[in-house]
């Protein structure tokens, strides 16, 4: 028994027949279908051009209708909104049309649009006026065959009139539309290749409301949408824009990676693997992470220390702490959380203090350091000591970073590890307080191939500086237990005045080995108004 989906087809029919104009966004696979739905569109246009392009073939029926059907099945499974298929010429004669309609219904497709051209079709914007049109009576027979074959009364068959494309004029467009109306078409799609809407407006004026009229303003895109609303068009199709935007992004990324032979400047400008997993389906995410996320981060937790106000930012932190300062339309803490989640760290803990009511991002657990004015970072960590177990990365709530930095820390087999910027002269030139370190050896190509350890923090002024500590501390489960022991041993006064570098010194004094990974930049400590401006470009 073939399944039908009357719910989606009813949604499409209602969209076409209601008084208000509707909008359909092009999609060409399951991923783009879900993107269109998440963006808020009520319906999807399964573009023949875009599906062909995604398959790497021409828009000339080089992909068979069964191959298109397979793509549609994924699109229907990925989205809850109705899909109107760009069905070219119906993929053959009336008999093919009957079979196509039955198969589309079985997959849950809400409707199909067929155009009155010769099979195999040629795209309307290629040699348009030289394209032959199908015999209108033969095409009407396809429409009638499709309507007789459908089992869902709401399934929509849209007749696409190509008379303007072929240069045959308004009278022929109206004659053909009326023929298709009489054959049972549910709506008319009137197409034009002009850069202005004169042809489609003249058609609508003469046609009136005999059937809903759909338009595709790919060429006359500068026309205000209000014009379409005022003239009473039923729906507008944005016909190929997800495919075209994706194509440009892929071209740019491929070119950049080829030229630079590195991913460092690309990774933060593309969506994370975690975002890909999310859009594939939240219910499947947990299992997908086990298979595909980078090793070592799936069981990690991050403790973000963000209790301070950041008084040096002036008016920016009068009513909110530094971690909630706006960076490109989102709080600084949100950028930090996204970077951690992008490498698979989902268990996020934040210690807040000043303006804690405003620190309220979702999917983060919070601990409160209400003594933030008279305490330092170690006390904030002590506040969240119950979370010191398993694998943990401690970081600051005012540091932006490229995600490879915590990833490299997570990949180390070490109880304690820190990230160090070997380009420490840059931070010196900014005239700010920095935590300079001495390592077992400076950054070099040889240091990449064997362990390097933290020897001293802070480094002695004037000599022995190998880099700047960047605010990251990676702990294994044993490392967490050791840190908890130290926290319990510290006096109340020591807890209140100590910073994380002081904690590192205590670890070194106990004979612990602290691994380090070198970086050269790729992070930003937001300490001033100038840093906030720089963060928007980071």
Image (cartoon, rainbow, N blue to C red):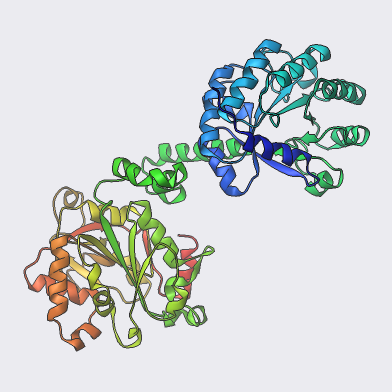
Q: Residue at x 16, y 71 (%)?
A: 483
Q: Is residue 35 left or right of residue 408?
A: right
Reply above or below: 210 against 93.
Answer: below
Reply above or below: 421 against 294.
Answer: below
Q: Is residue 236 visible?
A: no
Asked which quadrant contains residue 65, the reply is: top right
Q: Residue at x 41, y 70 (%)?
A: 526
Instruction: Give the percent coordinates (x, y) of residue 1.
Output: 54, 22
Q: Residue at x 39, y 61 (%)?
A: 337
Asked which quadrant contains residue 141, the reply is: top right
Q: Is residue 171 left or right of residue 370?
A: right
- Seen from the viewer's position, the closer of residues 390 and 466 is 390
- Seen from the viewer's position, the closer of residues 433 and 274 is 274
Outermost residue to the front:
1
Outermost residue to the left:
511
Reply above or below: 412 against 56.
Answer: below
- Seen from the viewer's position, the closer of residues 331 and 447 is 331
Q: Is residue 205 left or right of residue 70?
A: right
Q: Is residue 268 visible?
A: yes
The quadrant of the image that shows the C terminus is bottom left
- Seen from the viewer's position, the closer of residues 9 and 2 is 2
Instruction: Give the percent coordinates (x, y) of residue 10.
Output: 68, 37
Instruction: Give the percent coordinates (x, y) of residue 348.
Output: 34, 62
Instruction: Give the percent coordinates (x, y) of residue 529.
Output: 48, 75
Count every numbered label the image shows and give the total. Answer: 0
């Amino acid at each position: 028994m073939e399944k039908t989906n009357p719910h989606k087809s009813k949604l499409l029919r209602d969209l076409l027949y209601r008084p208000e104009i509707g909008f359909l966004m092009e999609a060409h696979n399951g991923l783009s279908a879900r993107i269109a739905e998440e963006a808020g569109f009520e319906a999807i246009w399964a573009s023949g051009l875009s599906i062909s392009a995604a398959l790497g073939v021409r828009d000339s029926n080089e992909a068979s209708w069964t191959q298109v059907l397979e793509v549609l099945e994924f699109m229907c499974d990925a989205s809850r909104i109705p899909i109107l298929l760009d069905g070219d010429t119906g993929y053959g004669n009336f008999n093919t049309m009957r079979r196509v309609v039955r198969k589309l219904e079985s997959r849950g497709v809400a409707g199909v649009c067929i155009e009155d051209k010769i099979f195999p079709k040629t795209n309307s914007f290629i040699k348009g006026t030289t394209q032959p049109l199908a015999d209108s009576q033969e095409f009407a027979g396809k429409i009638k065959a499709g309507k007789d074959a459908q089992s869902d009364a709401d399934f929509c068959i849209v007749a696409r009139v190509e008379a303007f494309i072929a240069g045959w004029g308004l009278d022929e467009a109206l004659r053909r539309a009326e023929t298709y109306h009489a054959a049972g078409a549910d709506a008319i799609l009137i197409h034009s290749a002009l850069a202005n809407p004169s042809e489609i407006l003249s058609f609508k004026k003469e046609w009136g409301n005999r059937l809903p009229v759909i338009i595709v303003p790919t060429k006359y895109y500068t026309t205000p949408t209000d014009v379409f609303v005022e003239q009473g068009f039923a729906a507008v199709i944005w016909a190929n824009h997800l495919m075209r935007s994706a194509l440009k992004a892929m071209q740019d990324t491929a070119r950049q990676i080829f030229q630079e032979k590195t991913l460092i400047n690309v990774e933060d400008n593309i969506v994370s693997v975690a975002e890909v997993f999310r859009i594939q389906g939240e219910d499947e995410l947990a299992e997908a992470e086990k298979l595909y996320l980078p090793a070592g981060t799936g069981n990690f937790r991050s403790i973000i220390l963000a209790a301070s106000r950041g008084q040096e930012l002036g008016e920016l932190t009068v009513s909110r702490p530094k971690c909630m300062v706006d960076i490109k339309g989102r709080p600084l803490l949100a950028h930090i959380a996204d970077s951690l989640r992008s490498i698979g760290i989902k268990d996020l803990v934040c210690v807040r203090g000043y303006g804690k009511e405003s620190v309220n991002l979702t999917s983060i657990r919070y601990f409160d350091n209400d003594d933030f004015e008279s305490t330092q970072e170690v006390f904030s960590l002590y506040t969240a000591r119950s979370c010191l177990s398993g694998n943990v990365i401690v970081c600051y709530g005012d540091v932006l970073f490229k995600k490879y930095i915590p990833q490299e820390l997570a990949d180390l087999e070490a109880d304690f590890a820190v990230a160090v910027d070997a380009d420490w002269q840059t931070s010196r030139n900014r005239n700010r307080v920095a935590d300079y370190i001495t390592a077992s050896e400076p950054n070099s190509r040889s240091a990449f191939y064997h362990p390097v350890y933290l020897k001293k923090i802070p480094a002695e002024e004037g000599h022995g500086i190998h880099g700047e500590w960047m605010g990251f501390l990676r702990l294994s489960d044993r490392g967490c237990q050791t840190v908890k022991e130290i926290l319990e041993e510290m006096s109340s006064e020591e807890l209140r005045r100590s910073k994380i570098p002081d904690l590192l010194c205590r670890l070194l004094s106990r004979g612990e080995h602290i691994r380090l990974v070198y970086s050269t930049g790729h992070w930003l400590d937001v300490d001033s108004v100038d840093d906030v401006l720089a963060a928007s470009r980071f």
